[in-house]
Image (cartoon, grey):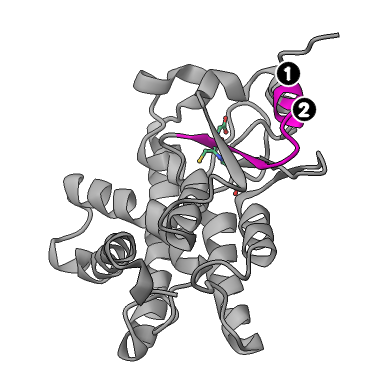
């Protein structure tokens, strides 16, 4: 019987992995960045991307792919569905280790430091720890207002203020980590661009911009994170223009 669900459509294409993305998702963006950095011509030969809308996430057909009804999600070529951005990213890095620059440190200590940076991001900033209606990640404090997102998704002002306090704590910790690594190079772990940069970059840039607009921080306090962010942008641009020079 013909089937038009997302899962059926993707399962008909076993030759490639299917990556489910959403335009404004910082969690999905780390996979997008990984794809861009790995190969200048893209990973289209191996990975097909499907851009979803927020409404698509809440359909039974997407629930069959990610029971949490969130992006990113992935379908492997054997049909197995995968969710959680950190798990997807680790899988891709492992699976395509022979392609492009290595984004995982070579030493156990380096990998541990990278894992800690990613875990703090995912636990305290970018993930809700319950999927029930009305619960949101800390980052939602920046934009999920009652006015724009309605009573179910939006938050009251005391909740937003508490979440902004949490964002402030975590970004302050990150700046300490970045400052300690800075003498060795421009990335979060110093010389090497790693999955930690791909994880934090899409979250940090908007977080800092919103903090500045709201008067929580001064221009001077923006410097370190934007330095890291701009380095990433330069890296990606350079990679596109001079693929031979990177990896
Ligand atoms: N821990 C999850 C978080 C995923 C997540 O929260 N994704 C957001 C987009 S950035 C989403 O799909 N939100 C839809 C919703 O919560 O309804 C991951 O890292 O994949």
From the top left corner, tell me how far across and down residue 37 is, in percent.
43, 61
14 in relation to 101, above or below: above
Q: Confirm whether residue 115 shows in the render.
A: yes
From the top left corner, tell me how far across and down residue 130 is, in percent.
68, 39
Q: Is residue 7 left or right of residue 195?
A: right
Residue at horizontal 62 percent and vertical 64 percent from the top: 93
From the top left corner, tell me how far across and down residue 238 is, in percent.
28, 66
Q: Quadrant of the N terminus?
A: top right
From the top left corner, tell me how far across and down residue 40 is, in percent.
40, 57
Give the Cα separation between the discs numbered 1 and 2. 6 Å
> Is the CB of mark 2 within 8 Å of ligand 1?
no
Ligand 1: image quarter:
top right
Q: Residues within 10 Å of mark 1 (few under 14, many from 20)?
A: some
Q: Magenta residues, as a range? A: 7-22
Q: Residues within 10 Å of mark 2 (few under 14, many from 20)?
A: some
- Give the number of the disc on residue 64: 2
- The secondary element bearing badge 1 is classed as helix
Q: Is residue 137 left or right of residue 166?
A: right
- Give the number of the disc on residue 60: 1
> Do the residues under discs 1 and 2 have CB atoms within 8 angstroms?
yes
């Amino acid at each position: 019987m013909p089937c038009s669900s997302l899962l059926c459509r993707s399962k008909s294409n076993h030759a490639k992995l299917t990556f489910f993305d959403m335009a404004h998702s910082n969690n999905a963006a780390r996979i997008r960045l990984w794809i861009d950095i790995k190969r200048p011509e893209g990973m289209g030969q191996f990975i097909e991307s499907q851009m979803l809308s927020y409404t698509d996430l809440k359909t039974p057909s997407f629930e069959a792919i990610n029971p949490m009804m969130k992006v990113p999600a992935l379908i492997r070529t054997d049909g197995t569905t995968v969710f959680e951005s950190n798990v997807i990213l680790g899988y891709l890095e492992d699976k395509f280790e022979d392609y492009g620059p290595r984004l995982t440190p070579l030493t156990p200590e380096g990998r541990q430091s990278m894992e800690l940076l990613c875990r703090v991001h995912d636990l305290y900033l970018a993930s809700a720890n319950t999927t029930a209606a009305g619960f949101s990640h800390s980052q939602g404090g920046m934009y999920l207002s009652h006015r724009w997102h309605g009573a179910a998704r939006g938050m009251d002002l005391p909740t937003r203020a508490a979440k902004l306090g949490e964002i402030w704590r975590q970004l302050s910790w990150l700046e300490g980590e970045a400052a300690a690594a800075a003498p060795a190079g421009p990335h979060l772990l110093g010389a090497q661009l790693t999955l930690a940069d791909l994880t934090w970059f899409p979250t940090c840039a908007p977080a800092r911009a919103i903090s500045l607009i709201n008067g929580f921080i001064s221009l001077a306090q923006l410097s370190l994170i934007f330095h890291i962010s701009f380095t990433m942008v330069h890296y990606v641009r350079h990679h596109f223009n001079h693929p031979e020079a990177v990896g």
